[in-house]
Image (spheres, rainbow, N blue to C red):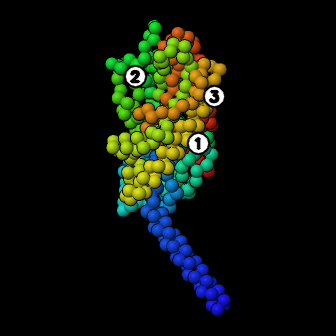
Amino acid sequence: MLSGVRQGFAGRRWRALLVVVAAALGLAVVAASQAATVVSDLLKVRLGGDGRESRIVLDLSQAATAKVVSDGFGDGRVEVILQGVATSGAQGAGGGLVKAWAADSVGGATRLRLDLAVQGRIKRRFLLPPADGIDHYRYVIDVAAEPSAAPIPVRARLAALRPPLPLKKVVVIDAGHGGHDPGARGAEGIEKDINLAAALALKERLERGGRYKVVLTREADVYVPLETRVRVAQRADADLFISLHSDSGPDASLKGASVYTLSDKAFSRATRFVKADDWYMKASLASDPGVSDILFDLTQRATKNRSATFAETLVGKLDGRAPLLRRSHRSAGFMVLLAPDVPAVLLEMGFITNPQDEQRLRDPDQLAELVEGVADSIDAYFGRPARLASR
């Protein structure tokens, strides 16, 4: 009797275990099926090199494999198919060995075509994973001129011996308010003028070092809609967006700078707003809505983390150069912070309603000191200038 009970109990345990295993296998199949639909996005195409050897770098959101259809030998036409990579289509002028390039979508893949300036062919190609501060994959294609091609000028040969130029980071500076929107008012001035003066000074400081491409959302006293300011950053493929403002408060004793990043509560608002205006083009390339939502969420959270990192760096660099508001790193749902693919902060440089802060912001020397702190934080955030992958 007891033996039969034990055997029945053991049988039930085995049946339960089989059910668990079957369920796990079913989930694995579903997960594999979902993974198979996940695509990588073509984020950017970059070129560098000279008339002897050139490098094409394709920035990808995920890992991908590629197949060479034509390596360029004989006709100077290179064609590579990147499996599972989505693009809405792009093209551009070349550089070095490449006269022009184009990328288009073909049957769930991206076709990259290169038109070479002289006879050449693919020399090597490889995939680089995220590393050294770069958070995405890079598929690298090196093309080299054939030995029988036209002689390489001495100047080009000397250029080939020099290290590649660093890739410039794109920084978009937004001077808050403008035109019919004056912003806050102080005893001697208005916010929109201070914001523009700071933006122009920061642009001049960043461009002086040659490491950045700087884009302003406005360069004069004009009104720019908030959503347009973010579109400027997205169209510029910005690596960083910083919106400059001058705070106001009901108490004239309030003073000090503060930095805002997107709040967690604003995530749902950002999702609705971005999808309604079709801002996030990369996620919309995925054919599966579920995959699109996952890509959107992952990108948004990664961007939020990068924004927070820069905000902390900015607070640290401003400390000692300008008074800081208590709890100087804050969060909010400002519209200019809503882009899911561009790290962004809003800097309140001080209270224009406070006499000391207004005087500091209107004084060119003291404003230059604050701008220097902002520029130092940008230098620290990006670290050493990024270079093309070494050979």
Numbered disc 2: secondary structure: loop
Q: Residue 277: image x %, image y %?
A: 33, 42
Q: Is residue 81 visible?
A: no
In the displayed structure image, the side of residue 380 where residue 120 appears, left or right: left
Q: Which of marks 2 and 1 is in front?
A: 2
- Say which label, 3 or 2, has the lower sequence index: 2
Q: Residues within 10 Å of mark 3 (few under 14, many from 20)?
A: some
The residue at 50%/15% (across/down) is: 251
CA separation in Å, label 3 and label 2: 26 Å
- Say which label, 2 or 1, has the lower sequence index: 2
Query: Which of the two residues, 290 or 244, is positioned nearer the viewer here?
Result: 290
Q: Residue 149: image x %, image y %?
A: 49, 52
Q: How crowded is mark 2: few (under 14 residues within 10 Å), some or many (20 or more)?
A: many
Q: Residue 18: image x %, image y %?
A: 55, 79
In the displayed structure image, the side of residue 289 where residue 135 appears, left or right: right
| 236 is higher (above) or lower (below) than 370 | below
Q: Which quadrant holds residue 326?
A: top right
The residue at 43%/13% (across/down) is: 185
Amino acid residing under circle 3: Gly
Amino acid residing under circle 2: His
Q: Residue 152: image x %, image y %?
A: 53, 45
CA separation in Å, label 3 and label 1: 27 Å
Numbered disc 1: secondary structure: loop
- Residue occupied by mark 3: 316
CA separation in Å, label 2 and label 1: 36 Å
Amino acid residing under circle 1: Arg
Numbered disc 3: secondary structure: helix
Q: Residue 387 carries which label?
A: 1
Q: Which mark is residue 177?
A: 2
Q: Which quadrant holds residue 373?
A: top right
The residue at 59%/22% (across/down) is: 324
